[in-house]
Amino acid sequence: MTTEITTAAELHKIDPVFGQLSFDNHEQIVFCNDKDTGLKAIIGIHNTVLGPALGGTRMWKYANEWEALNDVLRLSRGMTYKSAISGLNLGGGKAVIIGDSKVDKTPEMITKFGEFVGSLSGKYITAEDVGTTTEDMDRIHKVTSSVTGISESLGGSGNPSPVTAYGVYMGMKAAAKYQFGSDNLSGKKVMVQGIGHVGETLVKYLTEEGALVQIADLSQSRMEEVAKKYGATVYTGSDLYSAEVDIYAPCALGATVNDETIDRLKAKVIAGAANNQLANEQVHGKILQQKGILYAPDFLINAGGIINVYGEIVKYDKAEAMRRTENIYNTTLDIFNLADSQGLTTYQAALALAEKRIADRKKEMSK
Ligand code: NAD
């Protein structure tokens, strides 16, 4: 007798990997385990139609392995669309290492992880993400060439974060143009949540243009440092989502636009660096549209980093990477117009454009 499966929890019990809510026809999922170094990592290869799956490695203290698997599935899928919409010949992949990067990371663990990456013979290419650094990529480079974001002294393009920040800035300006009628951010109140590698450079661009920037981060000392450096204001309230700002820039972790926060948002534009900002892209994308909050799709505007590291695979040219990243401004406006004309959310419009590019390539390949 077969019983009907009605909930995601029931589905998990039967199909723990392919039954994951975030599973989206990923091509390959690799579980990496090394007892000696304590490495536990998962590499997610979502789609390689456009090229090798390139995406960073995140090291994070996940509450459990399900959370890590869910994250790598969501992140790798996002990379497929990010590269596709940016016109790069890359597929989508991502890796997660389970652990606290400040406590658990060792050179041996990173080397071992590099060996696992190398064993995939170029199908997955790694780079930095939250919890990993250029130094880690240099270490991985010693055992495999399937790595980008390595130091300039080794022929790489260095830390991609400043380029990511520039793309987010371009996307934010396009969103301001569409929502407020001008892309001049002078006098606009912006909340930057997370002032790490990307967030800090974004704060720099914004304050230079005269935006009134508030910053929020888990680290008090970091906030004080960045506030002093750029003349930003440390947010001292208890609920940054309900802060009276024009623009909310999520630059920490994903899923901050969720059932709990969405009704409290006062900002009229969401434009930031974090991946997977909408906890549920379909549901929350629609609610934002109904509330008149313009959402600049994350995978579109945070593509500066991947555009920059892509140069390491073809031929690195900083000026070309910046030019391509600057073009995020135009693509973002195109997406807003497309969404408007087709009655789609901005997320759906961006996704449609990315999916079309992949489908077109698949068609070409089958000829
Ligand atoms: P980072 O680790 O350097 O910075 C993240 C910052 O967010 C840290 O300062 C941390 O303290 C803060 N933070 C974490 N949780 C927070 C919370 N709940 N509230 C407030 N602050 C919090 O990371 P990064 O490289 O700056 O990346 C930021 C985001 O952008 C990540 O989601 C990353 O995946 C995404 N992203 C980064 C790049 C890149 O080039 N670095 C490219 C694309 C997307």
Image: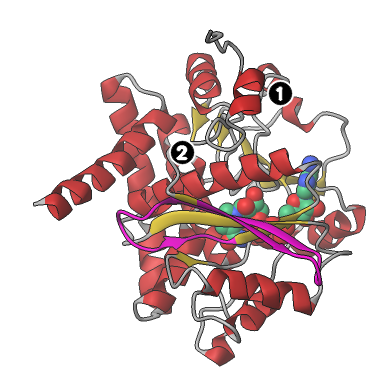
Q: Tell me what residue is drawn at x 23 percent, y 43 percent.
A: 359
Residue type at numbered disc 2 = Ala
Residue 295 is at least partly visible in this image:
yes
Q: Is residue 263 above or below residue 67?
A: above
Q: Name the residue under label 1.
A: 261
Q: In this view, does 231 lie to the left or right of 145?
A: right
Q: Where is residue 86 in the image (x, y as percent from the top left)?
A: 36, 54
Q: Where is residue 181 in the image (x, y as percent from the top left)?
A: 42, 34
Instruction: Count residues near mark 2 (Cα–Cα under 10 Å), then give few for <14, some for 14-19, many for 20+.
Output: many
Residue 205 is at least partly visible in this image:
no
Q: Tell me what residue is drawn at x 40 percent, y 80 percent.
A: 316
- Does label 1 point to a residue whose CB lies under 8 Å from ligand 1? no
The answer for how far apart the CA atoms under marks 2 and 1 are is: 21 Å
Figure quadrant of residue 344: top left
- Residue 244 or 95: which is nearer the viewer? 95
In the displayed orientation, state which residue is furthest to the bottom.
153
Q: Tell me what residue is drawn at x 64 percent, y 62 percent.
A: 201
Q: In this view, does 287 lie to the left or right of 240?
A: left
Instruction: Identify the magenta region.
Output: 29-56
Residue 48 lies within the magenta run: yes
Q: In the structure shown, which secondary structural element does the residue marked by tag 1 occupy?
A: loop
User: Taken as a whole, is the magenta stretch helix, strand or loop?
Assistant: strand
Q: In this view, does 171 lie to the left or right of 365?
A: right
Q: Is residue 138 above or below residue 338?
A: below
Q: In this view, does 167 lie above or below 38?
A: above
Q: In the structure shown, which secondary structural element does the residue marked by tag 2 occupy?
A: helix
Q: Where is residue 237 in the image (x, y as percent from the top left)?
A: 87, 33
Q: Tell me what residue is drawn at x 47 percent, y 39 percent.
A: 297
Q: Name the residue under label 2.
A: 175
